[in-house]
Image: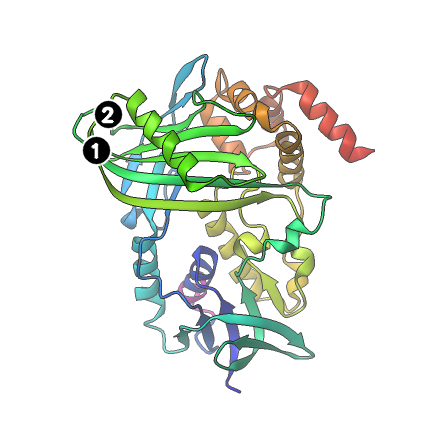
Amino acid sequence: MQHYHYIVTGTGLSAMMTVYEMVISGKFQDQSILLIDENTKKTNDRTWCFWDERNPFDNIISKTWNTALFADEHFQRTLDLKPYQYKMIKGLDFYNHVLERILQEKNIHFIQQKVTDFEELGNHCVVKTEAKSYTCNRVLNSIYNPEIVKRQSKYPLLQQHFVGWFIKSKEAVFNPDRATFMDFSVEQKGNTRFMYVLPTSETEALIEYTLFSPDLLQTSEYETAIQDYLKKLGITEYEIVEKERGNIPMTSYPFWKHNTQNIINIGSVGGWTKASTGYTFKNTIKKSKALVEFLSTETDLRQFHKKDKFWFYDLLFLDVLYRNNERGSQVFASLFREGNPTLIFKFLDEETSFSEDLQVIWKCPKGLFIKALFRRIF
C-alpha cells in the first residue's frame, strides 16, 4: 500500500482550508499529503457568507454589503455593520483559488475516489476507498456522519436547512447595498423560519427559505415559500438562474471525543461549524490556522480541542431553540431590536470579553435561558 504522511478524507471547506494553510505555512514541504474525494469540486455547489473587516480571501469575494435588514412581523431594522462588511464567496471560486495554489506543490496529491473507511492501527493509519487502501501517519477526516449525533440525546441536534434560488427579475425591487440577514415575517408554523436575501443588483438576488428545526421539509414546501415571498416583494416575472440547497448540523455535540492520537475530525464532523448560527467559513479559517500550528509542534491529536465559554453559550442556545422551536423569532428579535449589531457580530465571532458577553446575553428572553441553565446544571 502507498504511504503518505497525511491523508485528508473529503475535500470540502475545512479540508481545503487546512491543506491551504499547511502550504502557506511552509512547514510541510517535506511531507506527503493525499486528498481523497469522489467529487472533483468543478461545480458551484454552495455559497458562503460571513461578516468581516479584512480577510485572506478578499480577492475572491463576489459581493459585499455594508448594511443588513433584520425583520419580523412586528418591526424592521436596518443594521449598520461597520466596521464589518457582510461578504459572499461562491464555492467554485474558492475551490479554484485553493486548488490552483495547493496543487503546485509536488508533495500534494489528489485522488478521485470514495472513502469507505479509515482506522488507526498502532503507529499508522489505514484509509480504504472503493478502489484500494492507503496508509499514512495521520488522518484529517472531514466526512460528516450524522448518525454520530442522532444516536444520542444529551446534546440536541437542529438542522439549518434551506433551499435558495438565484433569480433575475423583471422588476427592479432589490437594494444591492443591503442584505436581508433574517426576515421572520413569514409564517413560522411552529418552527424557526426566515427568508434570507442577498441582492447583487436591483434585479438579481439569492433568495433562501431557511429553517432552524429538527426535521427537513419536502422540496415543494421550500419552493412555495420562496414563490410567496417573491410575490410579497412585488416580483411577478423572474428567471431562476441557479438553485442551491443545504443542510448544516447545529449541535454542541463533543465531536472531538472521537479523535485519536493520529486521527482528527475537522469541519462539521469536528465541531467547527458555529453551533448557534450554522456559520462556517470564518470559523474554519480560525480553526484551520490553529490546527496547522498545532500539527507543526504536537504529536497527540486528542489534545487539539479545548472547550470554552462560547461552547457553553451555544449549548444553552440550542437547548432553548430545540425545546421552544416556535420561539426562535422572538429570541433573535430580542437581540436585534435594540442591540448593538457590531457587538452582536463580535459575540457570534467569539471575540468578546465576559462583560461584553453579558451585554448581549442580557437582551435574550431570560426565563427561557434560565430554565435551560438549570436543566444543564441539575
Which residue in the structure is indicated by mark 1?
238
Q: Position of residue 282 (x, y in %)?
A: 45, 45
Please report contact status of discs 2 and 1: CB closer than 8 Å, yes or no. yes
The C terminus: image quadrant: top right
Name the amino acid type tagged 1: Tyr
- Furthest toward the bottom, the residue is 1
Residue 245, given in percent of the width and then of the height, sits at 40, 45
- Report whether 252 appears left or right of 83: right
Residue displayed at 45% across by 35% down: 210
Q: Please tell me in which quadrant of the rendered image residue 162 appears.
A: top left
303 relative to 183 in the view: left or right:
right
Q: Nearer the viewer, residue 281 or 58?
A: 281
What's the amino acid at mark 2? Answer: Ile
Q: Mark 2 points at which residue?
A: 235
Q: Is mark 1 on a helix, strand or loop?
A: strand
Residue at the spot 67% in from the left edge and 66% down from the top edge:
260
**Residue placed at 46% from the left, 22% from the top?**
187
- Magenta stretch in the rendered image: 21-27
Q: Distance between the residues labelled 2 and 1?
A: 7 Å
Task: Establish if 169 lies above or below 275.
Answer: above
